[in-house]
């Protein structure tokens, strides 16, 4: 190895190690936080609610606003269901920027929290599901819920969200907003040390290629 090659290799390694030092040790994963909260003090009384059916065209769309770029990972919402049928185990959901529309992004498995007696044969609970990581810029979006596998009623909260429904006849209209929370985390900006790390690594690869060419010659 020539002196110039040794100097280049040492410089490249120095840049890589400097980048790693600035990046710091790996950070533990953080629990999801509430990015948007449409629960209110009366959310869990489960008085008024909107029925979602396993089939048909019933659907809900509620607005939520993100003040900064975020990664959405899940949703909580208040629901009422029949004791006989039990809670729903899955639901279709969507996230869109267009109000009063009802697109489907996927089907999610539901997790039901502790239940409470809502009178007669009805139970109430906070229901949760994971959306998977969805990066979103700051702005206003709409959470869509539709087609659970068991009929459930989503509780109305009257919170700051604006909402629309689509009933079983396909009619779309305005609705009191539902009890829900958007979960996730604020998007982490690109570390300033990352370009430095990448340039050092690129330099090492270039040196290795030159060395290979010289050996072949």
Image (cartoon, grey):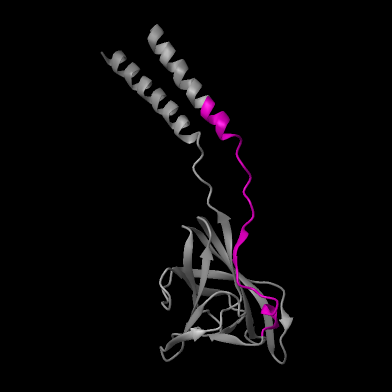
Residue 184 percent across, percent down from the top left: 57, 59
Say above or below: 1 vs 70: above
Residue sitting at x 71%, y 78%: 115
Q: Is residue 38 magenta?
A: yes
- Looking at this view, is 197 or 125 the one in front? 197
Q: Is residue 96 above or below residue 69?
A: below
Front residue of this view, candidates 13 and 48: 48
In x, y percent, where is residue 11? 46, 18
* Left or right of 11 in this view: 83: right
Number of numbered discs on residues: 0
Assess whether residue 129 is covered by the magenta stretch. Answer: no
Specify the quadrant that holds the N terminus: top left
Q: Say if 111 sits above or below 122 in the image.
A: above
Find the residue positioned furthest to the left: 217
Q: Name the residue at 66% across, 74% down.
A: 126
Q: Taking 77 as reference, is 139 above or below it?
A: above
Q: In the picture, which quadrant includes the C terminus?
A: top left
Left or right, 64 with reference to 216: right
Magenta segment boundaries in residue numbering: 18-46
Q: Percent x, y for residue 125?
A: 68, 77
Residue at x-position 41% and y-position 77%: 101
Residue 95 seen: yes
Q: Position of residue 46 (x, y in %)?
A: 67, 84
The answer to whether residue 56 of the structure is visible from this angle is: no
């Amino acid at each position: 190895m020539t002196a110039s090659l040794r100097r280049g290799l040492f410089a490249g390694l120095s840049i890589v190690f400097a980048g790693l030092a600035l990046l710091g040790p790996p950070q533990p994963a953080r629990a999801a936080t509430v990015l948007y909260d449409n629960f209110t003090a009366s959310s869990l009384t489960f008085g008024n609610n909107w029925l979602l059916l396993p089939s048909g065209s019933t659907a809900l769309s509620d607005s939520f606003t993100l003040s900064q770029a975020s990664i959405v990972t899940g949703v909580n919402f208040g629901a009422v269901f029949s004791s006989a049928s039990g809670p729903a185990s899955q639901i279709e959901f969507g996230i869109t920027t267009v109000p009063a529309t009802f697109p489907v992004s996927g089907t999610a498995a539901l997790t039901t929290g502790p239940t409470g007696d809502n009178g007669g044969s009805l139970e109430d609970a906070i229901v949760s599901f994971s959306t998977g990581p969805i990066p979103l810029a700051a702005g206003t979006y709409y959470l869509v819920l539709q087609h659970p596998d068991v009929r459930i009623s989503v509780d109305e909260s009257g919170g700051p969200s604006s909402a629309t429904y689509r009933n079983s006849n396909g009619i779309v209209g305005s609705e009191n907003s539902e009890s829900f929370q958007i979960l996730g985390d604020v998007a982490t900006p690109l570390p300033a040390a990352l370009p430095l790390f990448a340039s050092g690594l690129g330099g090492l690869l270039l040196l290795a290629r030159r060395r290979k060419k010289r050996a072949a010659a």
